[in-house]
Image: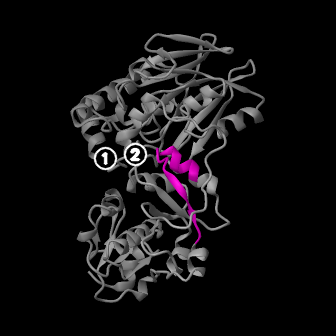
Amino acid sequence: MVEVVPIEDPGLGNTSYLVDLGDGSGLVVDPERDPRPYLDAAKRHGLVVRHVAETHLHADFVSGARELVAAGASLIAPRGSRLAHPHRAVGEGDELEVGDVTLQVIDTPGHTPEHVAYLLREGVTPMVLFSGGTLMAGGVARPDLISSDLTVPLAHQAYQSVRRLLGTLPDEVVVRPTHGGGSFCSSAGAAGPGASTVGSEKLTHPAVSAPDANRFVDDLLAGLGTYPPYFHRLREVNRLGPQTFGIDLPQLAPVGDFEGATLVDARPIDRFARGHIPGSVSVELRDSFGTWLGWLFEPDIPLVFVLDPDQDERELVRQALNVGLEKLAGRISVDDWADSGEPLAVIDLIRPDQIEPESPILDVRQESEWEMGHVPIASHIELGDLIRSVGLAGPGSVVHCGHGQRAMTAASLLARAGNPAAGVTTANHLEITQAIGRT
């Protein structure tokens, strides 16, 4: 049995794979930008990464394929991706001998036009399908990331691709998707990261249970929410070939000022609440840090970060580079700022029972979260839209999301725009509704 090592990124809801090819070499499928997780995993398993395969042009992260090529691997990519850097272009019917196994290429358009899946065989026996965004547990990856003109045709192609795979592959073939639940590339209903099988998907997948293609497409498109604007840039970044950094990612140099840059405070929100540099934007360093950083800021804007000594600077840099933000202008310390006599700003963290009766409430969760339930009197602006809509928030709003991080980001954006919030609560909508007793 071929060993497949999943390498997950919970912040993006994606999984890459390291495959033991049986001859001491390894294959990596759909790597993210930082090569170290794949090279470290290969070393632990006594492998050398000799091959890297892309299922499609990624929109949600900068590919690490060129990083692994620089480390000695050869790149396999869909013919339709038209990569502008060295690779072996493949398409329907191609079979590649890699190590002791065979990769059979299957055209699977849907998520993107150029998408392929790789069926790994031992001899003539199909073992594992690396399905990218085509076949996921309970769903498919979204077809609307390229253009509105292509969305419906790609959705129909996704239906055909899934049904073709499920109709031709043996039940025991293990399905290893790249996108999973939690990825903004995923559609509603897709399960979290993890393997499935062709047999189980035949029983439950919506492309099988839907009465026809039109119903599948209608349901798929109805369940699509918003996604970060950097998705529109990264496909072309990956096609042209991103800059390589190797395993030694850039370090953030200390700076004395941040003139001309945007100041991002990556400390936990309780520390930000107690005191922060005026005008800074709170984006707490966590699994989804990169997604929100890329959602809010354009790549041509220099970024200076506020970090505490106990935080992982390398992880911050990794996530920023992973979404194509490369103008990382340095770091600054709140303590140094305060010690120099400069003022600090505060944003109150408040309990639901501390919300004043007249305070407007602003919910900054995603539309799908809002529709599942919300405070009856609340207004709603998704966090991703707020940076362009700060004037629409009621003055003196109490901001909430569910855990507090997105709400604090929203409150800091409002404060920067001169529309300060009355506070941020970490409570969810049910707790707030019960506490305030208003309808």
Query: The disc labelled 1 sits on which kind of residue?
Result: Gly
Query: The disc labelled 2 sits on which kind of residue?
Result: Gly
Location of mark 1 (residue): 223
Please name whichever residue, 182 or 391, is drawn nearer the observer in this view of the structure.
391
Q: Position of residue 21 (x, y in %)?
A: 68, 21
Taking the magenta stretch, the answer to whether it contains residue 326 is yes
Tag 1 near tag 2, CB within 8 Å: yes
| Residue 115 located left or right of residue 72 | left
Q: Position of residue 236 (x, y in %)?
A: 39, 33
The structure residue drawn at horizontal position 41% and vertical position 69%, both measured from the top left corner, is 407
**What is the crowding at mark 2: few (fewer than 14 residues within 10 Å), some, or many (at least 20)?**
some
Please name whichever residue, 94 or 325, is drawn nearer the observer in this view of the structure.
325
* Residue 422 figure quarter: bottom left
- Distance from disc 1 to disc 2, alpha carbons, whole Å, reads 8 Å
Location of mark 2 (residue): 189
Q: Position of residue 45 (x, y in %)?
A: 76, 32
The structure residue drawn at horizontal position 51% and vertical position 76%, both measured from the top left corner, is 276
